[in-house]
Amino acid sequence: MSLEPLLEMQGISKTFNGLRVLKNVGLKVYPGEIHALMGENGAGKSTLMKILSGAYQADPGAEIRVAGEPVASFDPATAKTFGIAVIYQELSLCPNLSVAENIYLGRELRRGWTIDRKGMEAGCVEVLQRLGAEFTAPRGSAACRLPSASWWKSPAPCMPTPRSW
């Protein structure tokens, strides 16, 4: 295992309207590791992930390093360039879009000026098969039964954009 973490978050604090929801939190992720954040409601799990994804900014004094390099400003575009993707636990599908369009939402494949729907569908086939999905990528997500809809949003981290250095 590498001695240097792929991702390191140090001194992460977050305050909303005078209420401190995170206080000096740290997280290190090394190559080949899988992490799960667990805790009671209100423990700050989602807040920490929103800081990692760039959706929230940490309070001053926080440090985020990717592959050993400090990242001065962490926003959604920066997170995306590092291949960081966060899938939140809330069921937030777009029922008017296909399964493939939901998985690629925000990073759609393009062919010239148009969206490459066939390419996105093809890119989902292996992932959906590996996950044992009983539906296909072109199918509208509104047609998925709720149990299916609640678990299939997890293929997004399996798609090509996120990195595992």
Image: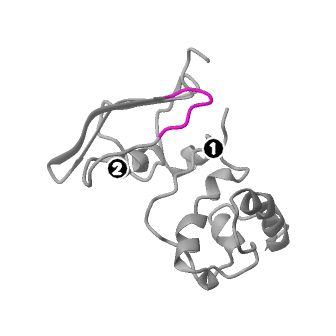
Q: How many marks?
A: 2
Residue bearing the label numbered 1: 83
Question: Over which residues does the magenta segment extend?
Answer: 29-35
Image disc number at residue 47 = 2
Label 2: how many Cα within 10 Å (few below 14, some 14–19, many 20+): some
Image point (47%, 70%), residue name = 91
Image point (64%, 58%), residue name = 155
**Is residue 60 placed above or below 145 in the rendered structure?**
above
* Quadrant in which the N terminus appears: top right
Answer with left or right where residue 38 lies relative to residue 157. left
Q: Furthest residue to the left?
A: 18
| Residue closer to the observer: 143 or 6 | 143
Answer with left or right where residue 5 lies relative to residue 40. right
**Is residue 47 placed above or below 163 in the rendered structure?**
below
Secondary element at image label 1: loop
Secondary element at image label 2: helix
The colour scheme used here is one colour
Dividing the picture into quarters, in which one does residue 41 lie? bottom left
**In the rendered structure, which amino acid carries the disc numbered 1?**
Gly
* Quadrant in which the C terminus appears: top right
Dividing the picture into quarters, in which one does residue 127 lie? bottom right
**In the rendered structure, which amino acid carries the disc numbered 2?**
Thr
Measured as percent of width and height from the top left, residue 36 is found at: 45, 42
Q: Main secondary structure of the magenta part?
A: loop
Is-magenta flag for residue 160?
no
